[in-house]
Image (spheres, rainbow, N blue to C red):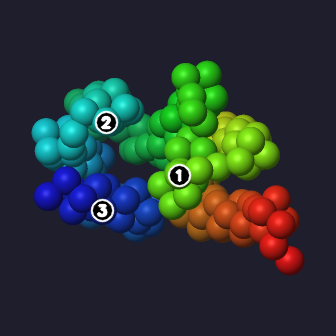
């Protein structure tokens, strides 16, 4: 059940910019807050006590509560900034309270990592932290100063393209680090 709710949050997050852009004519911000808050509450209640889950769920629930209480269209646009902030805290925090996030992910498929690969995973975690910082700053700037269409274009398409580009570049570099042609 927890995985299904996590998938629901992922799909909601991916479609969120489009839902805001196209749904504002038909739905009030409090309705977005209620729907999104329901997903986050379900995650909080069904998810385990894994690091990050509780505080992320609480922060998201506070955001959704504020959205529902203030019924503000401007507040709707801050959700992608919140998500980038979550990712920045997860990746950046893992650098201090280790092991780095990318090392954790790498050990899922390869438990024994060489010192060289461990150093590399730390560098990749730093790169992702910088990416999430820049992504959140761009989304925040667009929230404050750009038309809704620009915000939707960046948060709904461009940022995902940049994430894909980061994955592709990292994969190419990883092949070199691992000694593959």
Determine crowd level at label 1: few under 14, some 14-19, many 20+ residues with C-alpha closer than 10 A: few
| Real-space CA distance between mark 3 and mark 1, rounded to the nearest whole angstrom | 26 Å
Determine crowd level at label 2: few under 14, some 14-19, many 20+ residues with C-alpha closer than 10 A: few
Along the polypeptide, which appears first: circle 2 or circle 1?
A: 2
Nearer to us in this view, 104 or 137: 104
Residue 149 image offset from top left, x and y in percent: 58, 62
Q: Quadrant of the N terminus?
A: bottom left
Q: Which residue is mark 1?
A: 111
Q: Secondary structure at mark 3?
A: helix
Residue 9 image offset from top left, x and y in percent: 31, 55
Q: Which residue is mark 3?
A: 7
Residue 47 image offset from top left, x and y in percent: 21, 43
| Real-space CA distance between mark 2 and mark 3, rounded to the nearest whole angstrom | 17 Å
**In the image, which is nearer the foreground, mark 2 or mark 1?**
1
Q: Quadrant of residue 16?
A: bottom left
Query: Which residue: 60% across, 64% down?
Result: 160
């Amino acid at each position: 059940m927890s995985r299904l709710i996590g998938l629901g949050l992922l799909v909601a997050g991916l479609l969120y910019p489009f839902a805001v852009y196209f749904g504002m004519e038909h739905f009030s911000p409090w309705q977005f807050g209620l729907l999104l808050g329901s997903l986050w509450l379900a995650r909080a209640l069904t998810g385990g006590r894994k690091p990050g889950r509780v505080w992320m769920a609480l922060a998201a629930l506070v955001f959704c509560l504020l959205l529902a209480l203030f019924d503000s269209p401007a507040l709707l646009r801050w959700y992608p900034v919140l998500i980038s902030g979550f990712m920045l805290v997860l990746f950046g925090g893992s650098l201090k309270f280790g092991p780095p996030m990318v090392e954790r992910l790498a050990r899922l498929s390869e438990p024994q990592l060489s010192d060289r690969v461990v150093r590399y995973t730390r560098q990749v975690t730093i790169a992702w932290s910088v990416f999430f910082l820049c992504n959140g700053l761009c989304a925040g700037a667009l929230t404050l100063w750009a038309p809704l269409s620009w915000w939707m274009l960046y948060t709904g398409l461009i940022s995902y393209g940049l994430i894909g580009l980061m994955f592709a570049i990292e994969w190419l570099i990883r092949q070199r680090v691992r000694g593959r042609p």
